[in-house]
Amino acid sequence: MRTIPIHESLLRPQLLGGGDRDLVMLNGIISCALIFGVGGLVGAVTGVALGTLVHIVLVIWAKKDPQGKAVYARHIHQQKFYPAAASPFARQQIIH
């Protein structure tokens, strides 16, 4: 019997700082825009505080479900209702 090793790095989710990579980078961009765009002490404090708070939430979310963003994105694209149809040419009922 032959076994093929599967490396752990192929299975591990891509996390950055403990949170989902894409969301953490988006959070960093928005925080930097607040810090440098608004300017002054108010913008800096708001950007750092909001960025830190959102990052903590992203880390907690990634600990619960590392692939939560992908699952949510797939969930958004699903239809609300799938009618029973006996034929592939049956008319679909679209419910909004």
Image (cartoon, helix red, strand yellow):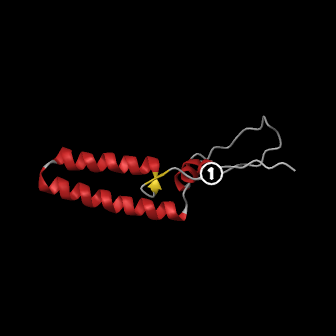
Identified at 56% across, 54% down, the residue is 67
Residue 79 image position (x, y, % from top left) = 62, 48
Q: Which residue is mark 1?
A: 11
Residue 54 image position (x, y, % from top left) = 36, 59
Task: Pick whichever, 58 or 7, lies toward us.
Answer: 7
Give the vertical position of 85 relative to 44 (above or below).
above
Give neighbour class at mark 1: few <14, some 14-19, many 20+ (Cα, 10 Å): few
Residue 44 image position (x, y, % from top left) = 18, 54
Q: Image quadrant of residue 53?
A: bottom left
Asked if residue 96 shows in the view, the reply is: no
In the image: residue 40, left or right of residue 63: left
In the image: residue 2, left or right of residue 24: right
Give the vertical position of 59 relative to 69 (above or below).
below
Name the amino acid type tagged 1: Leu
Identified at 38% across, 63% down, the residue is 56
Task: Pick whichever, 58 or 94, lies toward us.
Answer: 58
Query: Which residue ends up furthest to the front in the rendered image?
Result: 2
